[in-house]
Amino acid sequence: MTQSLAPNERGDSHPVGEVVLEVRNLTKHFPVGSFFKPKLVRALNDVSFTISRGQVLALVGESGSGKSTTARLISRLMPPTKGEIILRGKDVLKTERGRPSLNYRKEIQMIFQDPFGSLNPVHTIGHHIQRPLEIHKMLKGGNAQDRVYELLSTVGLTPPEDAARKYPYQMSGGQRQRVAIARALAVEPEIILADEPISMLDVSIRMGVLNLMEQLKEERGIGFLYITHDLASARYIGDRTMVMYTGYVVEAAESRELMEQPAHPYTQMLMAAVPNPQGGMVKHKAEVRGEIPSLTDLPPGCPFATRCPKVMDICKKVMPGVEQLSPDHWVRCHLYGPGETMTTGTGQKNAVTTAS
Ligand code: SF4
């Protein structure tokens, strides 16, 4: 069993268990345009990482960085162009061709940004929780109602009898996101893919949902892929953080190291926009400027070159490779050396990886 310590921003240091999910060189290119003018949206390029039992991996970046594509590929809502998804040592894209098996759907659950959109307005909350229990035959002779109440209590919706009787429109945004989490928990998953789970919630209730995820990680050993555009929440809950830009992972490290010593100019730019909890000035001041380039028309060389305050001549010609800064800190930038220069059809060596 792989063991490591993963301290996050709060200073928690808990043992992280064995690797549950491994993603290797995940790539997604979408053909767009007309027959005469075909184009390719390079949404995701050679992304590799692992998620261990009881670990939160935060995936951070702006819109169009490839974060949600990563979650959709892992949940198998669409197939990748290339890459491997390995669940408990089994390469599921090879062993389960086509639709994911019931077991895969049980082990990998997803919660979405818009909790209202993910709930059916004509069914009660109790129905939403009971349904996956029936589909996945999780009742094992037990009483469905008791299990529904137990799950609602776990996510803090009390008294559960009242919550179960309500319809989605009768709940607040934070309560609906708790329902979505309870529904995911019903099938006892190993991994939850949380795609911007707090971005549509009021600031006052965001912390409650993050603390609930933290509790589930600690008490049940659930691994989370936490997708966000907000470095502050990644710093709060993520054991590890990967920063993405135009479909590439540009930096990956244990969260505290990444926040204290951001190496990539893009990470520094994101950090500059994060309020400092100590109230002082941010250490890595960088101007937020420019727009993310079109994914169908990325410039040659480094995709961040059009916005980077530290751009050099080489950046406009050669895609930077990956440099290892410390045992657990990787960056894709020419400032830190030649790295493994990427050409095409890159392999594992060129992927910024995170491992427990
Ligand atoms: Fe900036 Fe060059 Fe590094 Fe890209 S490779 S982030 S352009 S310094």
Image (spheres, rainbow, N blue to C red):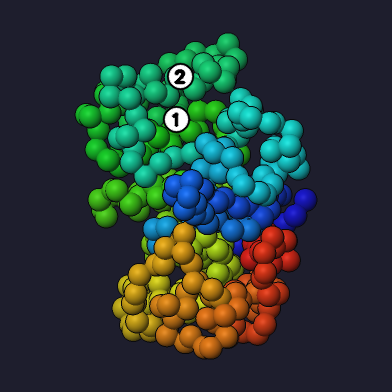
Residue at 58%, 47% (x, y): give it.
223
Q: Which residue is mark 2?
A: 131
Residue at 49%, 13% (x, y): give it.
143
Which disc is residue 346 wearing?
Answer: none
User: Which residue ends up furthest to the left in the rendered image?
Assistant: 170
Helix, strand or loop under label 1: helix
Left or right of 19: which side holds 295? left
Where in the figure is residue 169, as x and y percent of width and height? 23, 29
Residue at 40%, 30% (x, y): give it.
152
To which quarter of the image does residue 73 belong? top right
The span from disc 2 to disc 1 (Cα, nearest Å) is 9 Å
Image height of 202 relative to 284, above or below: above
Along the line of sight, the residue nearer the viewer: 95 or 27: 27
Along the line of sight, the residue nearer the viewer: 272 or 255: 272
Where in the figure is residue 29, as x and y percent of width and height? 55, 51
Image height of 319 relative to 154, above or below: below
Where in the figure is residue 237, as x and y percent of width and height? 47, 58
Which amino acid type is marked by label 1?
Answer: Arg
Helix, strand or loop under label 2: helix
CB under 8 Å between discs 2 and 1: yes
Q: Which residue is mark 1?
A: 183
Q: Is residue 209 visible?
A: no
Compare marks 2 and 1 and give the one earlier in the sequence: 2
Label 1 environment density (alpha carbons within 10 Å; few <14, some 14–19, many ≥20)? many
Image height of 146 relative to 320, above or below: above
Which amino acid type is marked by label 2?
Answer: Arg
Left or right of 233: which side holds 258? right
Question: For the C terminus, which image quadrant?
Answer: bottom right
To which quarter of the image does residue 96 belong? top right
Residue at 48%, 50% (x, y): give it.
36
Along the line of sight, the residue nearer the viewer: 325 or 315: 315
Q: Is residue 198 visible?
A: yes
